[in-house]
Image (cartoon, coloured by chain):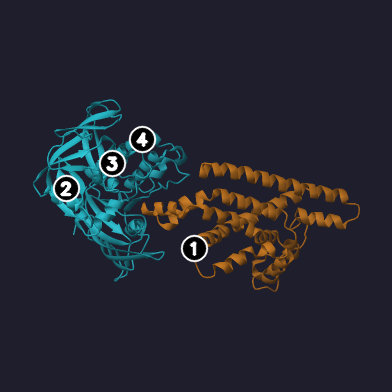
Amino acid sequence: MGEIVLLSLRIALVAVLLSLPLAVAVAWVLARVPFRGRLLLDVLVHLPLVLPPIVTGYVLLALFGANGPFAGLGLAFTSTGAAVAAAVVAFPLLVRPIRQAFEATDPGLLHAAMTLGATPWRAFWTIALPLATPGILAGALLAFGRSLGEFGATITFVGNTAGETRTLPLALFSALDVPNHESEATAFALASAALALVTLVLGELLARRSRRWTLGA
Amino acid sequence: MDARGLTLDGVVAARDGFTLTADLAFGAGTTAVLGPSGAGKSTLLQVAAGFIRPRAGRVLIGDEVLSDAAAGGWTPPWRRRVGLVFQEPRLWPHKRVHATIRYGGRYREDDVVAWCGIGHLLQRLPRQLSGGEAQRVAIARALLARPRLLLLDEPFTGLDPARRRQLRTLLETLQAELSLPIVCVTHLVSEALELTERLALLDRGVVVAHGPLAEVLRTPGAFGLAHGLGLENLLEVEVVGHGDGTTLARLGVHDLVLPHTDLPPGQRGRVTVRPEDVLLAAAPLSGVSARNALSGEVRELLPLEDRLLVHVDVGQPLRVEVTRDSALELGLAVGRPVWCYTKTWACRWWD
């Protein structure tokens, strides 16, 4: 049980850390960079939100599986692969709050920095990014929570190997298959619920604290 | 061409369907850019700061070309060293004052902090500052980056008289200590005159006139525009004492009865009077209720669309509006002595 919880937490954490830099970049582009094809990017980012996770898993398998073009990365059926599956499915939830935070920041604050000699790059790192902290935290925790609960894409892409890819939802699924393991299944379900709850409460507390810090609310 | 100031050489700049055309040299010292809202004042600042790239013409500071549409030359905002103080202070909510002001550099930090009077605010966050304090922090932030030119966008908006006086003193200090060219945008003549007699009058994207106020007003069409922007006389007086609901003050040899002010006797302050609120007489009047009589000499007669603007020297320039008929009847001419009368309540304290 403890091992499964730790594996779940590890995979979710790796998923968030893996996708965070890309999510910040994509959120910035969607919020502040006008270009042709922005709608396409927007749709692409949101796709995993509405696509059945099993389809996402299948696409990942087609790309990274034994016969896929990226088979060499060796992601299929590994815990890193599980993190990738969780990252893809949680990506829209990660991007959205960050993008909203960027959109809510007055561009004039960046202009002010530039009149003081700051390049757009420095203005981004010193002004835009710190001010988006509440959004980044909110997105990260939401994505973390979603990653903990990821099932469909994971089981399709990396299977259900104990100690490697068997996270809480997968363990629950396995327990349901074995007769007379209802109490075990219930324990997994309760653990999942508890983790989700803690994540959300933690997220709300952090968001409040950082909002007070950045906006003085 | 001036060695230091901003020059817009045949600049045409467009933004959101609005076009600004400007061809003028601001030079050193302080220039006020004056115009109604939508005249293109902010666009002009954005062009100078480098946030709008002109379609035609050149932008220079001194003899350094910042933007040349024909040759394709372009210096981005972060390499211009043009300080811009926005109408809203645009302080960063997450940075304390000390980190804020040092963001662009630490040029004469102790002096700037002292001039701006923000020494006691260094540990504060922007949300802990009043409007006037935030503005002084924004000015300090611009100065520490060692700008070659300072642009101010409506700096007096929302400030009470005491804060306005403070800001004026600060800008005068900057002129004296740094000899920094300043371009200040405003939509009120009185605010412009607060700082400088040198104006650039803007209307619908075109520079209607520029130069000293008197010269600007002589330009056809300029007076009507200036009048709409609250053209007023600004007279400096010395408080003598306080009467019953009034304050007694002196302007040169003249005694004035003015609305009450809290300024103590001996203190100097300024009073505004509208040109249409002054009565002009060819001889001293008796038996009138107007309490303030200022004798002076006609210096200049400006014919305007439907009236005459008379510049009377009463020790300070006083501009008076009269109809053409009354000018004829009074026999107004340059050099003629006249008497100017105002009611107490037509005068308002500026400070």
Q: Do the residues labelled 4 and 1 touch (CB within 8 Å)?
A: no
* Marked residue nearer the N-terminal end (3 or 4): 4
The residue that mark 3 highlights is: B168
Residue B148 seen by the camera = no
Chain represented in orange:
A
Closer mark to the observer between disc 2 and disc 3: 2
Extreme residue toward the right, this view: A180
Q: Mark 1 points at which residue?
A: A33
Give the alpha-carbon distance from disc 2 to disc 3, as whole Å.
26 Å
Which chain is represented by cyan in the image? B
Task: Describe the element under mark 3 as helix, strand or loop.
Answer: helix
Q: In which quarter of the image is residue B171?
A: top left
Q: Where is residue B41 in the image (x, y as percent from the top left)?
A: 33, 56
Amino acid, disc 3: Arg
Cα–Cα gap, marks 4 and 1: 39 Å
A65 vs B296, nearest the viewer: B296
Q: What element carries label 4?
A: helix
- To which residue does mark 4 refer? B119
Farthest-out residue, left: B335
The chain under label 2 reads: B
* Front: mark 4 or 2: 2
Q: Alpha-carbon neighbours of circle 2 within 10 Å: few (<14), some, or many (≥20)?
A: many
For disc 2, the marked residue is B311
The kind of residue on which mark 2 rests is His
Residue B132 shows in this picture = yes
Rounded to the nearest whole Å, what is the CA distance between mark 4 and mark 2? 44 Å
What secondary structure is found at the residue carrying circle 1?
loop
